[in-house]
Amino acid sequence: MTSHYDVVIVGGGPAGSTVAALTRRYAPQLRLLLLERALFPRHHVGESLLAGASPVLEEMGAYEKVANAGFLEKLGATFIWGRSREPWGFEFDELISQLVAQGKRLPRLYTRAWQVRRAEYDELLLRHAASLGVEVRQGARVTRVLWEREPLGASSSDADGWGPRAIGVEFVDGRGLQTVYCDWLLDCSGQQALIGHALKLREYDPQMNNYALFGYWQGAKWLYEYTGYPELTRICIITTPRGWIWYIPLKRDVMSVGFVTHRQTLKELPAGPEQLYLEELQACDEVRDLLKEAHLTRIAADQRRDVCAIQDWSYRSRRLSGPGWAMVGDAAGFVDPILSSGVMLAHELGQKAAYTLVSSFGASSDEEVRRYWEFYAQTYRTYLQAYRDMAAFWYSNNFSLESWFWQARRILARSGSELNLSDRQAFTRLASGYATRAESLSLFGSYPLHEAQQLVNGLFGAPYCREELAAQYAGRPLRLKDAELCDGLYYYQGAVRQTRRVINRQTRRYLDLHPGEEVLLSLFDGAHTLAHLEETVKALQALPQTERLPLRSGLDLLVQLEMIGVLA
């Protein structure tokens, strides 16, 4: 076996497979080794996907494989909680209702998801990565990270403050102890967090120290209001006095049913975890009758118990990267599963890690590499914080439907995503996996540029009537106020791209300019109008295009500048 690789990836779950597949796609010259300690298929919880993962699956080349794997398609979610036991929910298709009203089309994958059996799903993705040319070693347990010099922990740093360099790993497989060296080590080892534990980087959230007890029920009933139809299913989330229950269709005759509660609840009750689990299901009016004629079963060969337990203690890492290493997926951070964000975040942020990795190999300096990974960390924390805040709001015992919608809108506004969304639209977007507008452009990396432009402005932009706005802006002198320009970064088509960013000095909300748009800002001098802007855009569009996001129309640019409050 080769003793040196360009990239070693530890962990073969969705995060590891995503990093491997996309790095292979955009940098096929690199030598990749993926080490997975288990022998797939292996049992894992986290079965309900969000639509936000599907564009990444498409970019990986795995979307059709997943779509044809026999998993039940997921339509959306149903929620029941608090004093009012009326079920309500959302569907992913609500995301595109505004586009449909405008006569625009959106590829179906943007609103498509599945309820997956993770043993099969994870194996499918790992095999897909291997089919692309990634060297995959299963049954390979990493025992130690090799450093250029041994770190002292989280406080360990070099003169530049970025810490020691990872240079390889030791692992044990059927042939004994082995050593491989690498230029980059990607820790996708899940909650095991190989590097996070070695450097003592983990910070736990004391407010969300939960446990999940779960099992699989054969013969459980369907109820459309809760679970949808077998062809178009829903996850159902139901609050109880001591936590909440998930009810997920995995097969036509098998449901994944879990109970999430605070760790303190387990400590205070004399009953063991399995008895508590069964008592909670029996005490829940909505679930009791559905399970009356069902029995617990096991869905994977390595599932050791009928009732399983897993710690759901939310956490984040003080650092996500250093010289020669980075963390992805649950290794980097974990958010309470109330919105089913785990697998989606593994895919979405695994994509960002792959882009950053590819760009790092092409960087001209260590400073540039560090800047790329700091952008990755900023992006990661933005996503995690959005879902963490929503989960915290859930556990605050505020059971007003309207207040949940309002909280989602507030979270998106704080992340720079507020674009004339109603409260319900904001919640639907967050709950579907499209958390922040700042990163929404990256979702379209695998689509033709003209289509990407339409999707970005239609799905994530403000709904508006072009004729009305054109009339409003006609003849109006173009001026900016409270605006400043700085350098920015964005993710697109396999790399971290340089851009210029317009920032509102007062609110710090910003708009990343597409390549070539900076010259358009010279027209905002009080002497030009929308007509001049559109003429200049047409002239620029006639020039040879690079493989980057295309220019917006003049009207689209005006609308988005006004949204961040810099249009006078």
Image (spheres, rainbow, N blue to C red):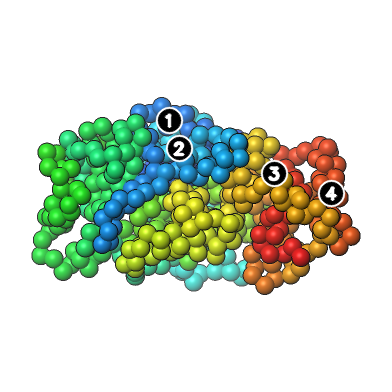
Label 3, on which residue?
549
In front: mark 2 or mark 3?
2
**Secondary element type, mark 1:** helix
Q: Position of residue 97 (x, y in %)?
A: 52, 42
Residue 177 in sight = no
Residue 530 circle label: none
Residue at the spot x=41%, y=27% of the render? 68
Which circle's residue, 1 or 2, is located before the other in the chain? 1
**Secondary element type, mark 4:** helix
The amino acid sitting under disc 4 is Ala
Residue at the spot x=18%, y=67% of the render? 267
Dividing the picture into quadrants, the one containing residue 103 is top right
Which circle's residue, 2 or 3, is located before the other in the chain? 2
**Secondary element type, mark 2:** loop
The amino acid sitting under disc 1 is Ala
User: Between marks 4 and 2, how big is the CA–CA gap?
Assistant: 40 Å
Q: Is mark 1 in CB contact (under 8 Å) with mark 2?
A: yes
**Secondary element type, mark 3:** loop
User: Between marks 2 and 3, how big is the CA–CA gap?
Assistant: 24 Å
The local crowd at label 2, few if under 14, some if 14 to 19, many if 20 or more residues have their Cα within 10 Å, is many
Which circle's residue, 4 or 3, is located before the other in the chain? 4
The amino acid sitting under disc 2 is Arg
The local crowd at label 1, few if under 14, some if 14 to 19, many if 20 or more residues have their Cα within 10 Å, is some
Residue 112 circle label: 2
Residue at the spot x=58%, y=54% of the render? 437
Which circle's residue, 3 or 1, is located before the other in the chain? 1
Label 4, on which residue?
531
